Image: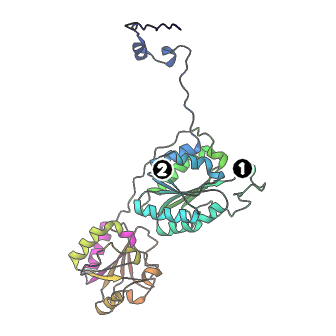
Amino acid sequence: MNTQATLLPSKLPATHFPLAIEKANTWSDVLPGLSKPQVAPLSVSEALVKTLEQMGVKYAFGVSGGAIAPLWATLQHSSIEVLHFRHEAGAAFAAVEAYFASGNPVVVFTTTGPGITNALTGLLAARWEGAKVIFLSGATSASQRGRQAFQETSTYTMPHAGLFTSGALFNYATTFECSSQLAEVSIRLALGLARPDGFVAHLSIPTAIQTSSVKTSLPGVSLSHAQATVSEDAIAQCASLLSQGPFAIWVGFGARKSAAAIRQLAEKTGAAVMCSPRGKGIFPEDHPQFVGVTGFGGHASVLKYMQEQPPLRTLVLGTRLSELTSFWNTLMIPSGGFIHVDIDPEVPGTAYPEAVTFSIQSEAEL
């Protein structure tokens, strides 16, 4: 069969299309009859995940399920690394340690009903340890509540107070009833994550809301961390108290970012240093001024020091002096009392209410 090649012109005709685009004011000026492409609105899941990315979330830990499927799928297609666990408790505990390892807020996600209750112990640990965790859970949609929906999660089946409200477990908690809530929620999360101490939030999101469209623009996210301001008078009084006699430094996990400053202070003043079990490693244990670990699994050398070379005062940095840290042993109370530095103003004086305590609300390094 004879074939004839199609001959292309050696030179294509000139076009003024680029010029037309340059002078165009609208899409119809370029291609008549073609309207400007419409950008599909974001769903609540998509908008929330974008907000979490802006807030610095790098990891999400959890167990998927039907009620959280839209949000989980969105996480999977984001820059956030999703780690799937066999049990929600393991996911929550892993999230706590991931926060302390990275310093970035983390996400825990679960489905409805038992998915939520399984995660509670780990989330309570997050609150106690001062981690920054955002808990995302599925919830039963409004039209299905009270109708024996599978793993129904509503006020008909689960206690509302404490689980879905702020309190001892969550610093902030809310249940989505419409997509317009996302703007306020974003602000609440930003304010909470900007706190110098921990923050645990619970966002309960019905499946129908997860896929609904966001019709309002979201506020910009700012996580500039506010620091407690210490007055010059308080600093001067602290320095005066420490200069009145020998003092010890009791270091806890909360002072982990101030290791260099603590060592400098100890070497400059000659203060003895002891640490809580979780504060091990902040101050070198082979240093001649280190006297040992206190509390559970601690060293007898600490009590020996307190009895044979008792300090006038003890500077407490980054520890609540809980039972595991101190056993509330009265031998640990110096004659002049404690100078307790903590970002939480409700901590100083609670472990040893009988002791004199000078309280400073601040980061350890300040």
Say above or below: 281 vs 75: below
Q: Label 2 neighbourhood size at 10 Å, few (<14), some (14-19), many (20+)?
A: many
* Residue lying at the far bottom of the rendered structure: 308
Q: Secondary structure at mark 2?
A: loop
* Residue lying at the far front of the rendered structure: 1
Where does the image place residue 5, in percent across and percent down from the top left? 46, 8
Q: Relative to 208, is 236 on the left or the right?
A: left
* Residue lying at the far left of the rendered structure: 268
Where does the image place residue 88, in percent across and percent down from the top left? 58, 62
Disc 2, disc 1: CB below 8 Å? Answer: no
Rendered residue at 57%/33% (across/down):
40
Q: As rendered, which of 215 and 354 lies closer to the eye?
A: 215
The disc at residue 296 is none
Q: Relative to 204, is 146 on the left or the right?
A: right
In the image, which residues are magenta? Answer: 229-255
Rendered residue at 59%/57% (across/down):
63
Q: As rendered, which of 246 and 175 lies closer to the eye?
A: 175
Q: Amino acid at mark 1?
A: Ala
Rendered residue at 61%/60% (across/down):
165
Q: Amino acid at mark 2?
A: Ile
Q: Secondary structure at mark 1?
A: helix
Where does the image place residue 78, in percent across and percent down from the top left? 50, 45
The residue pinned by badge 2 equals 80
Rendered residue at 22%/76% (across/down):
267
Looking at the rendering, which quadrant does residue 47 occupy?
top right
The residue pinned by badge 1 equals 142
Where does the image place residue 203, in percent across and percent down from the top left? 58, 54
Q: Is residue 243 magenta?
A: yes
**What quarter of the picture does the C terminus occupy?**
bottom left
Q: Is residue 250 magenta?
A: yes
| Mark toward the start of the polypeptide (2 vs 1) | 2
Say above or below: 271 vs 185: below
